Amino acid sequence: MKELFKFISRVGELKTEGRRGWKLHGIENPETTASHIFHVAMLVWVVGRKKEDFDLEKAVKMALVHDLCEVYSPDLTSYDATAIDEDKEFTKEDVKDLKPTKGRPTTKQRIKMKKVKHELEEEAMEKITKDLSPDLSEEINELWQEHEERNTPESKLVKQSDNIINLLQGMEYWKKGHKDIEYKLWVRRAKETIDDPHLLEFLKEIEESL
Amino acid sequence: MGKKHHLTETGLEKIKEELKELKEKRKKETKEDVPNVLHSEDLNPEFLDFRKKMHLLEKRIIKLEEVIKNAEIIKPPKDKDVVALGAKVTIKADGQEDEFLIVGSLEANPAQGKISNESLVGEKLLGKKKGDEVLISSKVKTVYKIKDINY
């Protein structure tokens, strides 16, 4: 029980951890990682509940754990990926030297970032769950790995919901006056990544509201 | 005849691998201690959880078997100047060049550059040729210029 208490206390730190992407835009008191997780989990639930051949409980749990690693791992954003040199090797050691750059990363930059981010986050997940009971630790890590691999209907919905919630939050900040958020690039990316029919409707609604 | 699932060879191999793992998992779960059906006079909640878990596992196995049965390997089209499933497309949009592989929804992974043919961009690129300009039209407009197509 002591280990579970420590885990819950540590995870609670995400309630006060402002998301780095918004901080880079100079947003004061930005959305925290925990509030982002809540929003993603809510979207997954309401969209996933009518899906066939779909494990809703697993999907909601997956949404809850998808950013848990940020207790220990750096909150790397697409602006960090944009700063990666496409033609050079990129390793964990290079992360600290990245200077976030506006714009959008290319596929090559995204792939390089994803590899390193995955390594860092895997280490963080190991650290967060190491003292938990084996069955709980295994469940959390399996959910996180499945989300990372994006092979199942549940992991695809969670990732696309993550994209929609980011877009929704970004557009809310944009409407509130943070005009340095390049909304056109954000919407464009969503049109490349989203293929779930319900989330395509959400995307349309977000775009209409601009 | 079920719905055709368009997959690359690698994509189909990955699905076969997942099916193998799930079948091993099913075997392991049913070999280990299965919870008792009854707890005192009531149904044991652990048994209900186990039954639900096995039911979902079984459904996923059936789904993957159906995908494998109805899989159609993506082959390059006769006209290689046209974007079709399996095409590696170099585009230029907003002054920036990028490259996507157009795949079916099952294989899509945008972080790896694999764009679904059911996404708004993937859908619009299909059937277009090198040099074409594709307008993704709605309130936010983007033009994708097709620079190259490879298979």
Image (spheres, coloured by chain):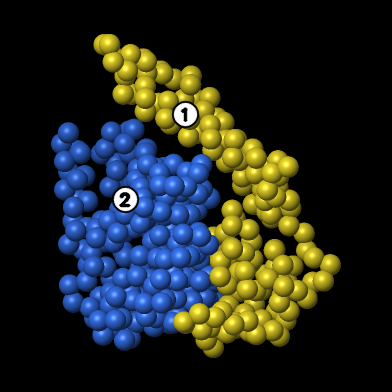
Label 1 sits on what residue type? Met
Tell me which residue sits at (51%, 84%) in the image: B141
Q: Residue furthest top?
A: B41
From where the camera sits, is residue A94 visible? no
User: Quadrant location of residue B83?
Assistant: bottom right
Look at the image and tell me whether residue B48 can be seen: yes
Chain B, hue in figure: yellow
Q: Which image quadrant is residue B38 in?
A: top left
User: In the image, what residue occupies the spot 35% across and 56% down?
Assistant: A43
Assess disc 1: are there few (<14), some (14-19) or many (≥20) residues with their C-alpha within 10 Å of its C-alpha: some
Residue name at image x 19 percent, y 38 percent:
A3
Q: Position of residue A156 (x, y in %)?
A: 48, 54
Give the SS element for disc 2: helix
Residue wearing tag 1: B54
The numbered mark 2 sits on a residue in which chain? A
What is the chain identity of the residue bearing mark 1? B
In the rendered picture, chain A carries what hue? Answer: blue
Residue ID for mark 2: A64
